[in-house]
Image (cartoon, rainbow, N blue to C red):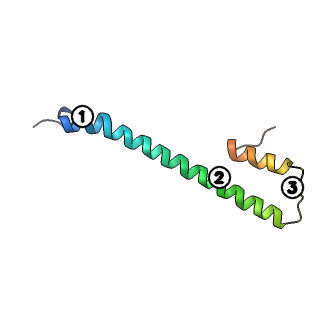
Amino acid sequence: MAELHETLMGRKLIEGDVPRMITALERIANALENNAKTELAKAFLTEMTESDIDISDGEVLDIVYELLLTGKQKE
């Protein structure tokens, strides 16, 4: 009996379908991650605007933006 990779359908699966599924999963993961960052930023900014902390100078927003983009605060 032929091995999967030796059949026409097996090669199509391994060489075409699996790489496309991996790409699709990466795109889904990136979209979910970006959505999570957006929701975190919205929640943070809502909390900040409802508190007594003044964020009008933009410094806090810059810090939050940098944290969301890189995961760390710039020096």
Q: Which mark is residue 11?
A: 1
Q: Which residue is mark 2?
A: 37
Q: Which mark is residue 65?
A: none
Location of residue 7 with respect to 38 vertically, above or below: above
Location of residue 41 with respect to 73 vertically, above or below: below
Q: CA distance from mark 3 to mark 1?
A: 57 Å
Q: Is residue 33 left or right of residue 64?
A: left
Q: Which mark is residue 55?
A: 3
Q: Is residue 71 left or right of residue 32?
A: right
Question: Residue 17, position in %: x, y?
Answer: 32, 40
| Numbered disc 1: secondary structure | helix
Give the residue displayed 37% in from the left and 37% down from the top: 19
* Image quarter hosting the C terminus: top right
Amino acid under disc 2: Lys
| Numbered disc 2: secondary structure | helix
Give the residue displayed 78% in from the left and 39% down from the top: 74
Q: CA distance from mark 3 to mark 2?
A: 19 Å
